[in-house]
Amino acid sequence: MEQTSHGRNNGTSVLTEGNPWRLLLVFSLPLMAGNIFQQMYTVVDTAVVGKALGVDALAALGAVDWLNWLTLGTIQGFAQGFSILMAQKFGAKDFSRLRQTVAASILLSIVCALALTAASEALAAPVVALLRTPEDIRPISMSYLRILFGGLPVVMAYNLAASILRALGDGRTPLMAMVVASLTNIGLDFLFVLGFHWGVQGAAAATLIAQCLSAAYCIMKIRGVEVLRLTKEDWTFNGPLSVRLMKLGAPMAFQNTVIAVGGMILQTIVNGFGVAFIAGFTATNKLYGVLEVAATSYGYAMSTYSGQNLGAGKVRRISEGIRAGLAIAMITSVIIAALMLVFGRLILSCFMPSEAGESVQAMDVAYRYLAIMSVCLPVLYILHITRSCVQGLGNTVLPMASGISEFFMRTGGALLLPLCMGETGVMLAEVLAWAGADLILVPSYFYVMGKVRDRKSVV
């Protein structure tokens, strides 16, 4: 095993020493800022489309939102799964195996990205029809998806590069990448949609160009990290290592796929309520990312923290870390919920066209949905902290089970609750999905930690 002392170098951070509260906050704040910038260009996309192109265009994006998330979630699942082993090898200071893991992850990611791109382009049209997307907005939806799906290899490149950096404790480079991407995307949105009048295709093209820049920035940074200077030997195919990586990445990708399929079933029900309801639902869904931006960041921090401390054999610190993470998450979720309840209508108005009629109906739908999610936000934050901790400990099967639980709760709620509660029932289905995941994840954490303690006592 190759071992060297490695505190903080080239932006990487060791999370095996120091106060867990401070470490998690310091590590997650750059991630949070990066996620905010990432959400900014999603929100600006939606705002520009809604304001400039009207309710139909806004509904067209929302009608296929979960289909787009299916591909993104699959990519993120593989990238995050691969990074778990990287964090463990970095925490153990086994840099030789770390480099081999990075090289194998790159090769696997190329194969996954190409396969996903081919499948997405081939299945887009039949799936859009299956989602019951209204005929009058279906061509707009397809134009948007074709461009995004063509850029999936770029999305994979960014997510893998960012995951590698986060595994080494570097949350600042992904932040800078998102700042560059966000500002680029916003500028191109105005140029392509408002200036060149390219419609939703312009919004999709702006997003793709921005993702290219963020991927290039992260890759450039990785090339400067000393412990990641890959040699010819690192690229030698390693069957057992590749299998181990797929055992970590595939369950996470499958977990996100199952969640997305549940969301697509939910979307078919939403699409049956008409264009105004779809538009309002879409506006709030675009804020969903803003609601969970801190939770996602804390989750990345928790995964890296638990992975590095497991690699270092510091089991007690993992328990201390999740307690700190949950406390930070609860405080944050309450603050965000209060802000959304007070300023929600003002924020949502940025997405709505100025004309009355369907816009008024869409606003009522959007704020009602936002209020329901805001009140229940602590449930979502518990989900992210516990799931990420369990994944960082090397178990991606139980989080996958939580994704299946989400699927049944989301689809069951969406199918049954509207029968007695109408539109509100559709909105509650999302909260039920969070609760269903928590019912699996909280016991899973105690189970996995018990196994970790048993292994340490035997050693």
Image (cartoon, rainbow, N blue to C red):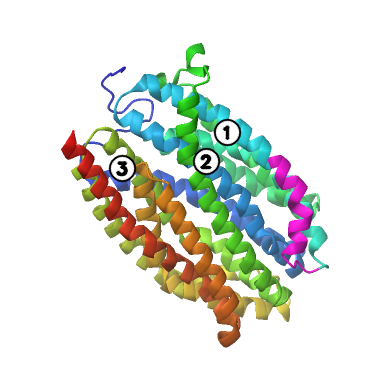
- Asked if the magenta segment contains residue 127, the reply would be yes
Q: Which one is in front, 26 or 277?
A: 277
- SS at badge 1: helix
Neighbours of disc 2 within 10 Å: few (<14), some (14-19), many (20+): many
- Answer with mark 2 or mark 1, whichever residue precedes in sequence: 2
- Image quadrant for the N terminus? top left
Where are the magenta residues, as a range? 117-134
Can see residue 150?
no
Q: Residue furthest top?
A: 232
Q: Position of residue 331 (x, y in %)?
A: 31, 63
Left or right: residue 128 compared with residue 422 = right
- SS at badge 2: helix
Q: Residue at x 18, y 33 (%)?
A: 459
- Answer with mark 3 or mark 2, whichever residue precedes in sequence: 2
Pointers 1 and 3 in contact (C-beta within 8 Å):
no
According to the picture, the residue beneath numbered tag 3 turns out to be 306
What secondary structure predominates along the stretch shown in magenta? Answer: helix
User: CA separation, marks 2 and 1?
Assistant: 8 Å
User: CA separation, marks 1 and 3?
Assistant: 24 Å
Q: Which one is in front, 385 or 192?
A: 385
According to the picture, the residue beneath numbered tag 1 turns out to be 109
Look at label 1 and name its amino acid: Ser
Pointers 2 and 1 in contact (C-beta within 8 Å):
yes
Neighbours of disc 1 within 10 Å: few (<14), some (14-19), many (20+): many
According to the picture, the residue beneath numbered tag 2 turns out to be 78
Please tell me whether residue 227 is drawn above or below residue 296 in the rendered image.
Answer: above
